[in-house]
Each structure stands twice: as structure tokens, then as C-alpha cells.
């Protein structure tokens, strides 16, 4: 009953943790979560498979697959040159719409103002019970537009810090299945990470049996470099 009528949301109000960093609990319906889980299985099958990116020779415990642009430490490319050289799947239109709705939800701006939000990449992460993500900034994008984050599956502890340094001050919050988190403006470059996953907490019906899916939508601000034909003599 409480899942159906969302009593838990009373204890988890929406909140601005820092200027521009907004947590909206229970934003996605169970049906939307289940649909995202199904898409996740399709994306993981390729053309570029789910993989742990190598950071300075160490494979990340979080596995990821990208859409639109492929992220590898510390750059975006169209082809997954660090995996199998294949081009990543395009970013679906529905994700651009979700991104706009999310930014409208977080900042309360009208549709006209958020129409300009056009994410061109999604990094889709999968965390098993042991996976973690150390404190980092999202700074491989050229654009200052916000990052939109969606969670499906097991809950986790999300550490959200400050733009100056990796350490304190930071705040630990729990992200649950269906939660939205947007960080932009003065919080766009805040350090953040995932310190724990809570196994067995995925709600029935969300489409994930074990583990956590996270999608971050971003605006890279990158352009394809066009190949120019030589000038006619
Ligand atoms: C990330 O920082 O890229 C992912 C954050 C998350 O998994 O919620
Ligand atoms: Mn990040």
C-alpha cells in the first residue's frame, strides 16, 4: 500500500541540498522504472557492451554503457575506441524529453525556458552490491548545462559535496529507485560519489532484481568535427 500511495515520500521531501542541486524523491513511476530497466538490457547488449572503464589502469567497479557520445576517462568520443571501436547507440528522443521534464521539475522553470536543455549523451551505470564510485567532478563536458540523474533498482548512499575540494563539506543522502537528482548552476562542478549500495532494496516491479541502474544525462557541448573536402583548385 505504501508503495502505491507513496507514504514514504512524506519522510523524503524534495530538497535543494545546495544552490542548483535538487533531489526529487519518487519522480519516476514504477512503470517508467520497469521500462528503463528493459531498455538498459537492450543497450547492454551492444553494439558497445556494458564495461568497467579503466581509470589509470584500474577497472572501475561500476559498469557503464553510453548513448550519444561514449565516455572514457577523460573524454567523449563517438566510437568506443577503448572497448571495441564501435559507434555508440544514438541518444533516444524520449531521453531528451525526460531531461527537459527533469530540469523543469527541479528548477520550476516553464517549458519555454527548459526547451533549450538538450542533452546529447547518457552515461548509464550499473552497480552490483559491491560497486562504488569515488568522489569526482563531472568535468569532461564543455557545456555548463546541468546533469540530470535517474536511479532505478537498489538504493544507494550518494555523497554530494562542494565544487572546491573532494572532502568536506559534503552530505550523504539515500537515492532510491525512481529518484531524480539534478545538479547545475553553482553546483554543476560539485564533487560527488556513491559510497554504498544497499542490496535487496529494489522495489518489486521496478524491473531490477539486483543492483542499481543510474542514468546521467549531460550536454557535452561537443561538435562532430566535420571532414572537409579539399578545395577545388
Ligand atoms: C555519476 O556520478 O556519474 C553517477 C552517480 C550515480 O550513480 O548516482
Ligand atoms: Mn559523476
Image: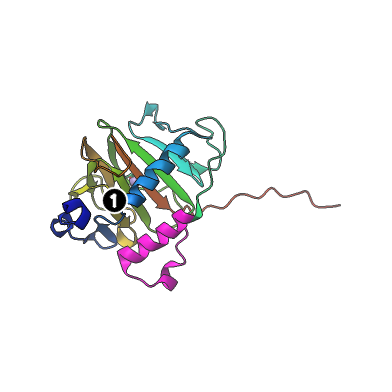
Residue at (47, 52) in percent of width and height: 220
Observer able to see residue 196? yes
Q: How many marks?
A: 1
The residue that appears at 15% across and 57% down in the rendered structure is 7
Residue 74 on image: x %, y %: 44, 40
Residue 13 placement (x, y as % from top left)? 18, 60
The verdict on residue 106 being magenta is yes
> Please, what is the dominant secondary structure of the magenta stretch?
helix
Q: Residue furthest right?
A: 233
- Residue beneath the point at 46% across and 38% down: 42
Q: Where, by quadrant of the figure, is residue 156 drawn? A: top left
Query: Percent x, y for residue 91?
Result: 50, 49
> Residue under circle 1?
178
Which residue is nearer to you in this view: 143 or 119?
Answer: 119
Mark 1 Cβ and ligand 1 under 8 Å apart: no
Question: Badge 1: how crowded within 10 Å, few (<14), some, or many (20+)?
Answer: many
Which is nearer the eye, 156 or 185?
Answer: 156
**Label 1 secondary element:** loop
Q: How is the image coloured?
A: rainbow
Q: Position of residue 49 (x, y in %)?
A: 47, 32
Q: Is residue 72 visible?
A: no
Instruction: Please tell me which residue is depicted at 28% across the width and 38% down the height of the picture.
Output: 134
Which residue is outermost to the left? Answer: 11
Q: Which residues are magenta?
A: 94-118
73 left or right, relative to 78: left
Compared with 8, 76 (above or below) is: above
The answer to which quarter of the image holds residue 200 is top left
Q: Which residue is farthest front?
A: 1
Taking the image as shown, residue 22 lies to the left or right of residue 116, namely left
Amino acid at each position: 500500500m505504501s508503495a502505491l500511495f507513496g507514504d514514504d515520500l512524506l519522510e523524503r521531501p524534495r530538497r535543494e541540498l545546495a544552490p542548483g542541486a535538487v533531489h526529487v524523491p519518487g519522480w519516476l513511476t514504477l512503470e517508467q522504472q520497469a521500462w528503463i530497466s528493459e531498455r538498459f538490457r537492450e543497450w547492454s547488449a551492444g553494439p558497445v557492451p556494458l564495461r568497467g572503464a579503466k581509470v589509470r589502469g584500474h577497472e572501475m567497479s561500476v559498469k557503464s554503457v553510453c548513448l550519444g557520445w561514449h565516455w572514457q576517462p577523460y573524454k567523449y568520443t563517438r566510437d568506443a575506441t577503448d572497448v571495441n571501436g564501435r559507434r555508440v547507440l544514438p541518444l533516444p528522443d524520449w531521453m531528451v524529453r525526460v531531461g527537459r521534464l527533469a530540469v523543469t521539475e527541479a528548477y520550476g522553470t516553464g517549458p519555454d525556458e527548459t526547451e533549450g536543455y538538450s542533452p546529447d549523451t547518457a552515461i548509464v551505470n550499473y552497480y552490483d552490491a559491491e560497486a562504488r564510485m569515488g568522489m569526482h567532478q563531472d568535468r569532461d563536458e564543455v557545456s555548463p548545462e546541468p546533469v540530470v540523474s535517474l536511479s532505478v533498482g537498489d538504493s544507494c548512499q550518494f555523497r554530494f559535496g562542494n565544487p572546491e575540494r573532494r572532502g568536506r563539506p559534503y552530505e550523504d543522502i539515500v537515492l532510491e529507485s525512481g529518484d531524480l537528482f539534478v545538479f547545475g548552476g553553482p553546483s554543476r562542478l560539485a564533487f560527488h560519489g556513491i559510497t554504498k549500495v544497499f542490496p535487496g532494496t529494489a522495489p518489486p516491479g521496478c524491473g531490477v532484481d539486483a543492483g542499481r541502474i543510474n542514468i546521467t544525462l549531460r550536454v557535452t557541448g561537443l561538435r562532430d568535427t566535420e571532414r572537409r573536402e579539399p578545395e577545388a583548385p
